[in-house]
Amino acid sequence: MQWWCAARGSAWTWSWQAYPGVWLLVLAIALAYWRFFGFGRRLPARHADTNADGAAGSRGVPPRGWPGWFVTGLLCLWIALDWPVGALGAGYLASVHMLQFVLIALVAPPLILLGVPAGRPALRAGPWNLLELATHPLIALVLFNLVIIFTHLPSVVDSLMASQLGSFLIDMVWLAGGVVFWWPIILDRPARPGFGFPMKIGYLILATIVNTGTFLYLTFSELPVYSTYELAPPVYGISARDDQTLAGLLMKVGTAAVLWTAIGVLFYLWYREESEEPSSTSHA
Amino acid sequence: MIGAVRAIARSLSMATATLVTLVACDAGSEAARATEGGIPPSSTDAAAGYRGVVLEPGPRPDFTLSDVDGKAFGFREETESQLALLFFGYTNCPDICPVHMAGIASVLRDLPWEVRDRIRVVFVSTDPGRDTPERMREWLSGFDPRFIGLRGDLEAVNRIQAKLALPPAIRGAVPPDGEDGGGYEVGHAAQVLVFGAGDRRLAYPFGTRQADWRHDLPLLVSEFQASYAPPDTARASNARSGLD
């Protein structure tokens, strides 16, 4: 039995496989959330404007700190890591590997962070200093893009995906990179007054551009770049090159879909904040 | 904080050790690849610049089997004017055979037609029980309709493999019902043999990448064209020099 999905070299089968390492990770993250923030907060009956923590919510959209966000993010993470997506992505199809990347680094982290109540976590001295530094927008953007480049290098993928520990490392680097990247967008601790809506939007627009190199490399390479997927037992006759092209497109389209959705949400929140300011002033 | 730093350092050292081990394993498999197959690698041609394993020179094998149309196909005569790629496998193979065939087909599609036209790919079935002519035609056409499928009884196929110093194909046990649809696997040689100019022979073990084929095939065709004299041309040349 494998504890984490890794390339196996045997033919793909739809027989279910257990990956206890994935369950332990998901359980550990859920327990950490319960320990620090609890699952007891209910969705306010009318979450149109503000929630109990004072964070603004959009009309019809649950506010920051709602545990449902966290649960949805954790589910995305679980789907990406466990059988069948995790197993297919680890050793058979580069396109599914890229789907994993999108889910682990771009979809799950913002949802998990949206589940963190406003004003949390309470940053203290010690290891938090490192987190504060890593989540500085400039450093976070650089780190995240280094993660994208490094974890898609053929030598890295082919070396690490062959072992469970290596595959685990790649998944964890994606998750950590995603959390660091989304932190300054979603969390308000540490406070960064200068990093308002326009800066956040610029940050995300920049992020949509910088992965273009990796996308072009994968999509337009004349030959398969990853031996892991080129020499893997075929799944439904998908050729290695078609699979790689699909992976490149998924990276670009998947990343763009997530980032532009976030940009749209930020624009809306910015607009709402701007349009509400005069009325609140007049009331005061 | 110090504990956290130590934990990170421990993880990094573990990851480094894993990477070193993986690289060592990879190097080992390269060595294993080089010695795979029965024909010994050539020592004199080691620096020929090919990514395949250059074998001791030898003539093309002379055998005749049935193609997917039921016609006799003499390997030596039918392929003498072309670079020949010969592979022994079976269409129900879950891994090695489709990866080899897909890789070669993909590279052939990208080569200029004048190079592609000088290459013949011959697939010999090691599972004649299940590899009917129709099944072979359908399976090979999925990669490249020009691929040639040959079949004969397993004893005959194994005799051909023995002449090429390849291990015989061995039919595996049928797994219990419910697993793998009640099918069976066939153990077979994993390398593609290439017969080029003169007695040039190379082996491409499993693990050969499309980049390797893309590198070697044009070189091999070029070498073949430089040395190959069609029978008619050779006769004419001999006549001119008074030898015929």
Image: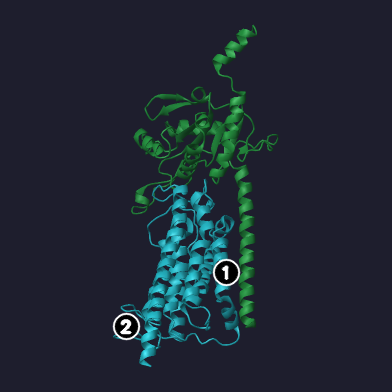
Colour applied to chain B: green
| Residue type (three-letter) at the residue carrying disc 2 | Ala
Judging depth in this view, the residue of B214 and A49 nearest the camera is A49
Tell me if residue B204 can be seen: no
Tag of residue B130 = none
Residue drawn at 37 percent across, 88 percent down: A280
- Kindly report the distance in space between the C-alpha atoms of the residues bearing marks 1 and 2: 35 Å
Q: Which residue is mark 1?
A: A143
Q: Which quadrant, please, contains the C terminus of chain A?
A: bottom left
**How far across and how far down the image is residue B36, in percent?**
59, 42
**How far across and how far down the image is residue A159, in percent?**
58, 58
Judging depth in this view, the residue of A215 and A271 nearest the camera is A271
> Does label 1 or label 2 sit earlier along the sequence?
2
Vertical arrangement, residue A17 with respect to residue B220, above or below: below
Judging depth in this view, the residue of B57 and A102 nearest the camera is A102
Colour applied to chain A: cyan
Q: Quadrant of residue A160?
A: bottom right
Q: Which residue is mark 2?
A: A48
Mark 1 vs mark 2, foreground winner is: 2
The answer to whether tags 1 and 2 share a subunit is yes
Q: Are marks 1 and 2 in contact (CB under 8 Å)?
A: no
- SS at circle 2: loop
Mark 1 is surrounded, within 10 Å at the Cα level, by few (under 14), some (14 to 19) or many (20 or more) other residues, namely some
